[in-house]
Image (tube, coloured by chain):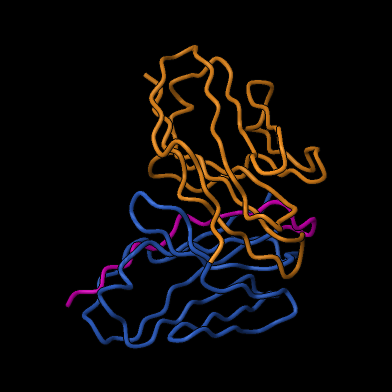
Chain colours: A orange, B blue
Amino acid sequence: EPEVTQTPSHQVTQMGQEVILRCVPISNHLYFYWYRQILGQKVEFLVSFYNNEISEKSEIFDDQFSVERPDGSNFTLKIRSTKLEDSAMYFCASSPRQGINSPLHFGNGTRLTVT
Amino acid sequence: KQEVTQIPAALSVPEGENLVLNCSFTDSAIYNLQWFRQDPGKGLTSLLLIQSSQREQTSGRLNASLDKSSGRSTLYIAASQPGDSATYLCAVTTNTGNQFYFGTGTSLTVIP
């Protein structure tokens, strides 16, 4: 069964550095998402992306964050000037369409540790 | 803002028992509700999706129900097995369909 693939599985970075988290969504999916889960907390929505542009973003997704689909397969999340509180599990997800009958398919996540 | 609550936070049952996990949400204007399973250090695996117009969905030993007007859903697991041990999350979408709001999950342990 097709899967959402995320790399790396674990990233350690120093405070103030920039990181890029990478995702390969399922190939025929059109909607892409980033979520994060701080240890012990809820999974939180960051951003959704469709047709090469952001369709919705949460208040968490400020100017520190950006997303890109640089080619036909990859979907990236860039975090600039990382802070300690950015340490979390970051999940990429995709769905074939939007709305009422669109299950989300998640990747296994990238654990980001900011030291 | 949509708030999703799950109770209990943790549950431990002996193998073979039937069990019910509960999910409640504050805003009934949802598109759909999805139940996920999360194993430690792993991503989320979709179990069942219920559209807002539906009352329940079944997959194998799992049955999810939805009472949209009262803002509640339950996940029923029949004849539990040790392999069912995981954290179970429910999530609802807003009417835009873009953003899922997640609960904090129920950590299930099935004792052999």
User: Number of numbered discs present?
Assistant: 0
Find residue B5 and report its horizontal and vertical position in percent.
51, 60
Find residue A50 and report its horizontal and vertical position in percent.
78, 46
Residue in view at x 17 percent, y 78 percent: B112
Find residue A90 and report its horizontal and vertical position in percent.
50, 40
Up the image or down, B16 lies above or below A82; here it is: below
Query: To which quarter of the image does residue A77 belong?
Result: top right
Residue in view at x 70 percent, y 56 percent: A29
Point out the residue furthest to the front here. A72
Left or right of residue B71, residue B58 in this image: left
Left or right of residue B20, residue A18 in this image: right
Query: To which quarter of the image does residue A15 belong?
Result: top left
Residue in view at x 53 percent, y 64 percent: B90
Left or right of residue A18, residue A59 in this image: right
Closer to the camera in the image, B57 or B27: B57
Residue A90: in magenta span: no
Up the image or down, B33 lies above or below B75; here it is: above
Magenta part of the chain:
B94-112
Point out the residue furthest to the left here. B112
Find residue A63 and report its horizontal and vertical position in percent.
69, 21
Query: To which quarter of the image does residue B58 belong?
Result: bottom right
Left or right of residue B104, residue A104 in this image: right
Closer to the camera in the image, B112 or B43: B43
Residue in view at x 62 percent, y 60 percent: A104
